[in-house]
Image: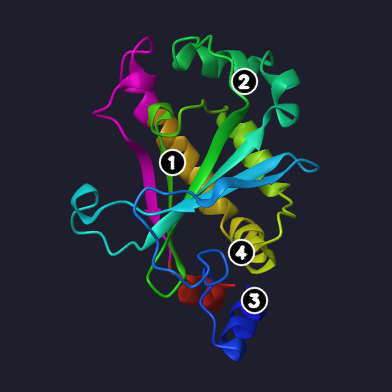
Amino acid sequence: MLETYAGLAERGEHLLHRLLAGQTPRQWQHYPQEDAIDLRSGYQWFYHSHSPEDRPGSAEHGHFHLFARRPLWSRRLHSHAGQAFARLTGQPQRTVQTRHLLSIGLDAKGVPVSLFTVNSWVTGDLMLNAALTEQLLARIQLNTGHPDIERMLTNLIRLCLPQIRLLLAARDAALASRQPDTVLTDQTLEVLSHLPIDLDRQFLAG
């Protein structure tokens, strides 16, 4: 993580400089436009930013959404944990190609400042049970042609696995607080769980 940001500093580049092609990001647009997909590992991501009106009081520049593609989880939906999570979320029958794993917020300097999870209506796919989500995040590998971003994401996740475990528990508590048959489409429930992170403090603690 430190080497990645040190290399960017030596080149005088922002983490997102190449992804955005030096342009100011347009609100809601995916970067890259068709998402960054690693078909070999089965992971996918994109970056985007919201309008200030949609995030009042937030200092977030934008955030990454991370996904697992079908080959990583399709055979594991019928485990006991998978079935319990399906009951918690109203036994959704939709066929989707991705499952949302995690969102990572950045500040204007390109430094991660938050971890959060969102409801399924936000991303248009579904989620996985907490244990499988954590396992897939712990094993994440990325090769999508954006090496600085990939190194940041994979190392941040490994650094923050204890926080991610808490985040997923809070996510499931938020889901359990609503009716299963409508929880995934409840547009009053957007962010399911959120944790600020302070990398300077985390490095010192490590």
Q: Earlier in the sequence, mark 1 or mark 2?
A: 2
Q: List x then y, in percent, for residue 175.
A: 38, 25
Q: Amino acid at mark 1?
A: Thr
Q: List x then y, in percent, for residue 195.
A: 39, 53
Residue highlighted by disc 2: 81
Q: Are marks 2 and 4 in contact (CB under 8 Å)?
A: no
Secondary structure of residue under mark 2: helix
User: In this orientation, which residue lies closer to the viewer: 99 or 168?
Assistant: 99
Label 1 to label 4, Cα distance in Å? 20 Å
Q: Residue at x 73, y 39 (%)?
A: 42
Label 3 to label 4, Cα distance in Å? 9 Å
Label 1 to label 2, Cα distance in Å? 19 Å
Q: Are marks 1 and 4 in contact (CB under 8 Å)?
A: no
Q: Residue at x 71, y 60 (%)?
A: 145
Q: Earlier in the sequence, mark 1 or mark 3?
A: 3
Residue highlighted by disc 3: 4
Q: Quadrant of residue 4?
A: bottom right
Q: Quadrant of the N terminus?
A: bottom right
Q: Residue at x 54, y 87 (%)?
A: 12
Residue highlighted by disc 4: 149
Residue highlighted by disc 1: 117
Q: Residues within 10 Å of mark 4 (few under 14, many from 20)?
A: many
Q: List x then y, in percent, for residue 164.
A: 52, 48
Q: Residues within 10 Å of mark 1 (few under 14, many from 20)?
A: many
